[in-house]
Image (cartoon, rainbow, N blue to C red):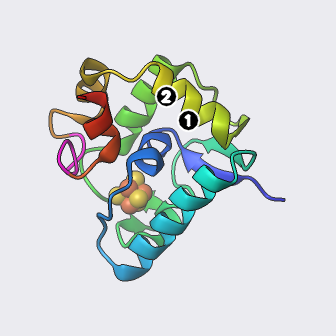
Amino acid sequence: MRPIKLRAHHLLCVQGYKGWGLTPEFKEFMFALSEQLKTQPDSKIEIVDGADDICGHCSELVEGKCAAPPDPGIQDAKVLRHFQFMLNTEYPAKVVADKIKSTLNPDVFKEICGGGACEQYPDNCRICDESTT
Ligand code: SF4
């Protein structure tokens, strides 16, 4: 089966998805993907550089690139560095979830998603809720 292609910062978004998004179609896709990764932990995720399967359902994707400021590539780079994930590599969904949960902490999420990097931080992200409890 084809792996799910995700850019690095979306590895966090899918763990903490609470329903944000610009369109009903985007929300439906995100809920389905989050559920799949939870209930089918052997699902393969390939970490890609740039637009991914989530971006493909997002109205901010323009000519194959994210048009939403600030540049999400900065968040991607922070996620790769902090969690030691490799680009263009496949991981089982459970390995990704365990790796993120085992190093979850409020300072890391603030560093990656705070400071205006993500509009959903902190209130609309479940992973942020968990990192602060
Ligand atoms: S806002 Fe940008 S990075 Fe996020 S899903 Fe849309 S196109 Fe992708």
- Determine whether 77 is above or below 124 in the image: above
- Binning the other alpha carbons within 10 Å of mark 1 as few (below 14), some (14 to 19) or many (20 upward) gives some
Determine contact: label 2, label 1, CB under 8 Å: yes
Q: Position of residue 112 (x, y in %)?
A: 31, 29
Specify the quadrant that holds the N terminus: bottom right
- In the picture as drawn, the residue positioned furthest to the bottom comes out as 24
Q: Secondary structure at mark 1?
A: helix
Q: Is residue 48 left or right of residue 26?
A: right
Check mark 1 vs ligand 1: CB closer than 8 Å? yes or no.
no
Q: Position of residue 3 (x, y in %)?
A: 74, 53
Residue at horizontal 22 percent and vertical 51 percent from the top: 120
Expressed as whole percent of the image width and height from the top left, the position of residue 62 reads: 41, 68
Q: CA distance from mark 2 to mark 1?
A: 5 Å
Q: Which residues are magenta?
A: 117-123
Would you say 27 lies left or right of 100 here?
Answer: left
In the image, what residue type sits under mark 1? Ala
Amino acid carrying mark 2 in the image: Ile
Q: Which residue is disc 2 drawn over?
A: 100
**Vertical position of residue 69 compared to residue 57: above or below:** above
In front here: 30 or 90?
Answer: 30
For residue 66, say whether it is visible: no
Quadrant that contains the C terminus: top left
Q: Is residue 108 left or right of residue 13?
A: left
State the predominant SS element of the stretch in magenta. Answer: loop
| Residue pictured at 48% horizontal, 71% vertical | 57
Q: Nearer the viewer, residue 1 or 60?
A: 1
Q: On the image, which quarter does residue 12 sit in?
A: top left
Q: Which residue position holds label 1?
A: 97
